[in-house]
Image: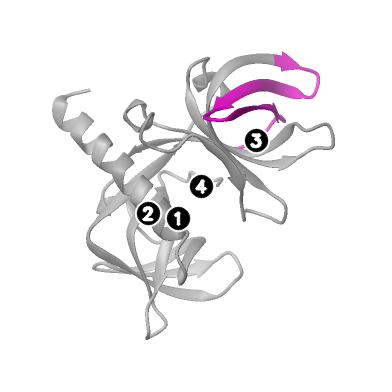
Amino acid sequence: MKSTGWRAALALAATLVATSALAQQPGMVRVRGTIEKVDGSTLTVKSRDGSTLTVKLADKARVTALVKASLADIKVGSFIGVTAMPQPDGSQKAIGLHIFMDAQKGVVPARFSQWDRQPGSTMTNADVTSTVSSVNGQVMMIKYADGEKKVIVPPGTPVVKYAPGSMSDLKAGAQIFILGAKKMPDGTLETAGINVGRDGAAPPM
């Protein structure tokens, strides 16, 4: 990658870390939905629960693209995010995978946490230490700062990878995920970073 590309990727990673911290603050919400209209830096979004939201992008907001990928793109050493459901045996059953860019490794926190994709779900950002095929799908071992998880990836599990994005990726019909948006007094939401599916990709987190 050219030096300008690395700088862009590092800036993106820093934005993700900052947005992750903001998402933990009171008044911050996650947004999942589909863009219905774009008016400059203001988006009309149909959220996953069916409500219509007005999302304003802050000055110099970071746009990150998510592009379709496959399990073949995940190798030993890949830094990935796993959206999953805990299983009785302690393993995690993946419901979505996203592959971080190389420049995000070491910047985006490697950790396991509870998640809100669906009730009881989890999120793990971790390095892949092994991956093998099984009768139930792909089995991966992933390691993060203070632990490791066994992940079962059923056939058909959505996989995407991060890529630098731009305002041109924000268009009607595109699906988005915002890690942390601030609730404003007028009921609108404001965000400094947005993830958007490119060419029909859907954020699985």
C-alpha separation, residue under disc 1 versus residue under disc 2:
7 Å
C-alpha separation, residue under disc 3 versus residue under disc 1:
21 Å
C-alpha separation, residue under disc 3 versus residue under disc 2:
26 Å
Q: Is label 3 in contact with label 1 (beta carbons under 8 Å)? A: no
Is 97 or 197 nearer to us in this picture? 97
Is residue 9 rendered magenta in the image? no
Mark 2 closeness class: few <14, some 14–19, many ≥20 residues within 10 Å: many
Q: Of label 2 and label 4, which has the lower sequence position? A: 2
Q: Is label 1 in contact with label 2 (beta carbons under 8 Å)? A: yes
Q: Position of residue 119 (x, y in %)?
A: 71, 56
User: Does residue 22 lie above or below 52 as drawn?
Assistant: above
Q: Nearer the viewer, mark 1 or mark 4?
A: 1
Mark 1 closeness class: few <14, some 14–19, many ≥20 residues within 10 Å: many
Magenta portion: prevailing SS class? strand
Where are the magenta residues, as a range? 133-159
Residue 157 shows which numbered tag? 3
Three-letter amino acid code of the residue under disc 3: Thr
Q: Of label 3 and label 1, which has the lower sequence position? A: 3
Q: Which residue is mark 1?
A: 179
Residue 41 visible within the image: yes
Q: Of label 1 and label 2, which has the lower sequence position? A: 2
- Number of marks present in the image shown: 4
Three-letter amino acid code of the residue under disc 1: Leu
Q: Position of residue 188 (x, y in %)?
A: 39, 78
Mark 3 closeness class: few <14, some 14–19, many ≥20 residues within 10 Å: some
- Which quadrant is home to the N terminus? top left
Q: Which residue is mark 2?
A: 19
C-alpha separation, residue under disc 2 versus residue under disc 4:
17 Å
